[in-house]
Image: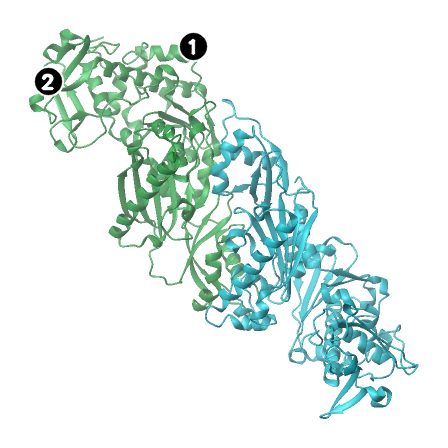
Chain colours: A green, B cyan
Amino acid sequence: MMHNNRWVKKVTLPPPSLGDNTADADRLAAALKKSLGIRTVHMDLALLKQLPARLREWNFRATAVWFKDDGGNGILAHLAAPDTADTLCGLAVDLGTTRVVLRIIDLSTGAHLGESVFDNPQITVGPDVLARIHHVEKPDGLNRLNRLIVDGINDALKVLCDGCGISRANIHLMSVAGNTAMTHLLIGLNPRWMIREPYIPAVNRPGVITAAELGIHVHPTARALIFPNVGSYFGGDLIAGILYCDMDQRDETAILVDVGTNAEVVLGNRKWMMACAGAAGPALEGGVTRMGTMAGPGVIDRIAIDPDSMAVDIHTIDNQPPRGICGSGVIDLAAALFRSGMIDIRGKLLPDRCGDRFKLKDGLGHLTLVTADQSATGQDLGVTQADLDSLVRSKAAMYTILETITGSVGMQQQNLETFFVAGTFGAYIDPASAITIGMIPDLPLARYHSLGNSSLGGATRVLENPECFDRVNQIRDGITYLELNVNQDFMNRFSAAKFLPHTDTSRFPSVRWPDGR
Amino acid sequence: MMHNNRWVKKVTLPPPSLGDNTADADRLAAALKKSLGIRTVHMDLALLKQLPARLREWNFRATAVWFKDDGGNGILAHLAAPDTADTLCGLAVDLGTTRVVLRIIDLSTGAHLGESVFDNPQITVGPDVLARIHHVEKPDGLNRLNRLIVDGINDALKVLCDGCGISRANIHLMSVAGNTAMTHLLIGLNPRWMIREPYIPAVNRPGVITAAELGIHVHPTARALIFPNVGSYFGGDLIAGILYCDMDQRDETAILVDVGTNAEVVLGNRKWMMACAGAAGPALEGGVTRMGTMAGPGVIDRIAIDPDSMAVDIHTIDNQPPRGICGSGVIDLAAALFRSGMIDIRGKLLPDRCGDRFKLKDGLGHLTLVTADQSATGQDLGVTQADLDSLVRSKAAMYTILETITGSVGMQQQNLETFFVAGTFGAYIDPASAITIGMIPDLPLARYHSLGNSSLGGATRVLENPECFDRVNQIRDGITYLELNVNQDFMNRFSAAKFLPHTDTSRFPSVRWPDGR
């Protein structure tokens, strides 16, 4: 199998003669098959109709934009002049529940030409996956959700293309990585059975679809790879993440954790991969990171507390006056409170240590971090005991999931050489804080790697390199999905993890104890 | 590889469970792959969107109409209830230059539900392939030709479906066999380069196209196999003919001759096939059967002459008053004239033997068969010396082509065990007459087999049996096309064949000579 490292290929055909009267399409297909090492080449009628005139105009030379389908068959997505001045582009899409990111790639060079981020317009229907899936039960609900995201992409794409100085018709290939529900809504598939036992998506491998069928306004013969999913709770964004961090090609066993509303975890190497997703079970319904505000200017993302003076040092995004606290800030806060002895190992606020900052309102403890006169909202900013309890459950769920998945393959957590943290949230988490509260294992910090937007990264790689395309389904098919069985054993581990950092303190030797233990 | 002998398949899926959470589409695909022995299964978005609700409504049982693409990938063309009362149909099309034949097939049983014949509406643009190809140079010419045939099929299909008591939406599969030019015009491909050296079609293997793309009004997700061609002059109608007579599966070497304006010939068996097409070269430009009227009521199709009394016995189609003579009639006539000594071995009218029937007009000999008072036209009916000269050139071309193709594989014509004659024209030819004039070899008559409409027959078989689908491309790819090289050697053979039956009379031992030789 020959490999080509781009989706753009210059071809020169032997000109037809009386002794070689193969038809135009078959002549082009033969040349592409030979030079690309593929078995078949499909071309749309629209392209076929132009072919004879074009090949003669171009003296039997051309620039081909090719792609593949799910079965490995070649597709001719576009044919341009051999010396075309057009930029032949691809569009990578990170289809997030909250945010959508578009990236334009020059398919010839792999250069990134531009990027655009916008809120998923489906937020107007519901903030999270569950609310949107429920919305499909309403009249025209599915169609409305589908239109919202398709229109949203089309609108943002127009602005992005203008900014890059290209036309939308310059886009010939797309790749879309998103969770299973968002992917279904983009394609227009009903996700209702995903949230009903036994939790079945409409499709695991949507494969390659024409952009026209998706309703995306790019070149009429453009193709879109929709990343496959492993199930309702393990989506294409994760497959893209695995591709992006090359877990499927590594000799050493790595772990990839995507912390969103759920935690999705993959453990593996080039020989095997094991995956699971939580929040699992009724105790964990709040999800892993339910607490906190969405990141944005003025949101507290870093907190330190001097254990001696109890002085609180906060950092806000863009250094704006504080107006809330985001998930990474809450983890920092919990770690700081624990280190300074302001909460106990159950995460309970200790009024004696908290001093003036502590108040009891309606029987619920409140800790003030920023007083009303210094906050952007004109109100005290802080956390409640309920917030902290929620964090403790979340961190315990995260840790238990990690313990369960490593345990399922007979591996010790401390033997994890490479720990990838994916997602926007992951990019902000301070691993030291997360270790302090026992959310993640007590590994040397150098083993933690923040991947940033690995969903977009994986989607991009598919457009940069045909070999990465082939890996997408290999990754999907290579994953063993571990159904989290919330049995007594799991609940015992969960209970042990509900302490800071853990009932078994020997697992967290690096954590400095407030009371000097 | 498992085989299934129909395109309709009942499937029962294992219902999803917590322990088997494969998505709906992938579950269905897995079941189809397993039971059909195919590698991949594509389904259109329109179908995918309905899938989850349908599968649950039907309790994970269904009736699938499947097909394949050119690369052997499976396609789900339709999904119906497990106990559907709908008749699941296919449409076979013989796309002739002159006539188009439609046939509806019940895909479940293979039963033929109805048939419809209509004149190719492109005749209004031009009577033959060449005129139509020239028409594409005119503004909107290609589009007009394309609309004519697409509308023609749609109109005839509506009437046919009404007659069969089915809806056009009951049609899920199509197969279309036609010559290369007609196929191009149906798809909307420009055939202009087919008639310009080096005579290159736009495509050899159009493969499987959606009926919607063709503009044919059947079920929206229906698929159409367009029979492949070997070149501009050897089309899908011949591939269908080979399939229909099973040449590609026979141990003995057979020959298939389709006599239309051109003669197309295939010689072969299950191990190899050799094909060629003529009229070849400038001497043969008139084609093989240019002479004669199209068959129809009142047209003379059989002629006998009593060698003693010179009485002419004619037969007309439907026994109507004579109004012309068709190709098979001309061959019968020439044989009769030769047997009765009214023409010589060069095909020249012998005035002495023709008597009153012979007249010289403007220096050109005329032979009257039916006098004005007995003809439907009110004019004398007969042939001229020019008609006979044309016939002699045509029969010589036919014979030379047969001699050339058998010679190319080192075979003696008399060793041909099976001689298939295809096409409407072939159905009317009397082999004894054709042998008498030396148009075809002097084989025992039992070796001649008229296939009738083998193009329609082959198109039908593809819809009756998936194995036949697989054979279509195997046949195409297995054919060696012999480019008729009109060199001195060919012209020598042609000259020798311009005598009745041949200069080498030993080749025609069965022919009874007029002068008793």
**Amino acid tagged 1:** Gln
Which residue is nearer to you in this view: B51 or B193?
Answer: B51
Alpha carbon separation for disc pair 2 and 1: 42 Å
Chain letter for mark 2, please. A
Q: Which residue is mark 1?
A: A488
* Helix, strand or loop at mark 2: loop
**Amino acid tagged 2:** Ala
Q: Residue at x 68, y 57 (%)?
A: B456
Q: Is residue A178 above or below residue B181?
A: above
Q: Which mark is residue A311?
A: 2
For the C terminus of chain A, give its image quadrant: top left
Which residue is nearer to you in this view: A471 or B334?
Answer: B334
Kindly indicate the quadrant of the structure image that contains residue B510.
Answer: bottom right
Is A203 situated left or right of B324 in this image? left
Between marks 2 and 1 in the image, the one whose residue lies nearer the viewer: 1
Q: Which mark is residue A281?
A: none
Chain letter for mark 1, please. A
Label 1 neighbourhood size at 10 Å, few (<14), some (14-19), many (20+)? few
Is A127 situated left or right of A11 in this image? left
Q: Position of residue A82 (x, y in %)?
A: 40, 62
Which residue is nearer to you in this view: B499 or B515?
Answer: B515
Kindly indicate the quadrant of the structure image that contains residue A332.
Answer: top left
- Looking at marks 2 and 1 on the same chain, the residue that comes earlier in the sequence is marked by 2
Label 2 neighbourhood size at 10 Å, few (<14), some (14-19), many (20+)? few
Q: Position of residue B327 (x, y in %)?
A: 74, 73
- Does residue B260 appear in this view? yes
Q: Is residue A404 above or below residue B477?
A: above
Kindly indicate the quadrant of the structure image that contains residue A321.
Answer: top left
Q: Same chain for the residues at labels 2 and 1, yes or no?
A: yes
Q: Is residue B241 above or below residue A413?
A: below
Q: Position of residue B279 (x, y in %)?
A: 67, 74
- Does residue A1 appear in this view? no
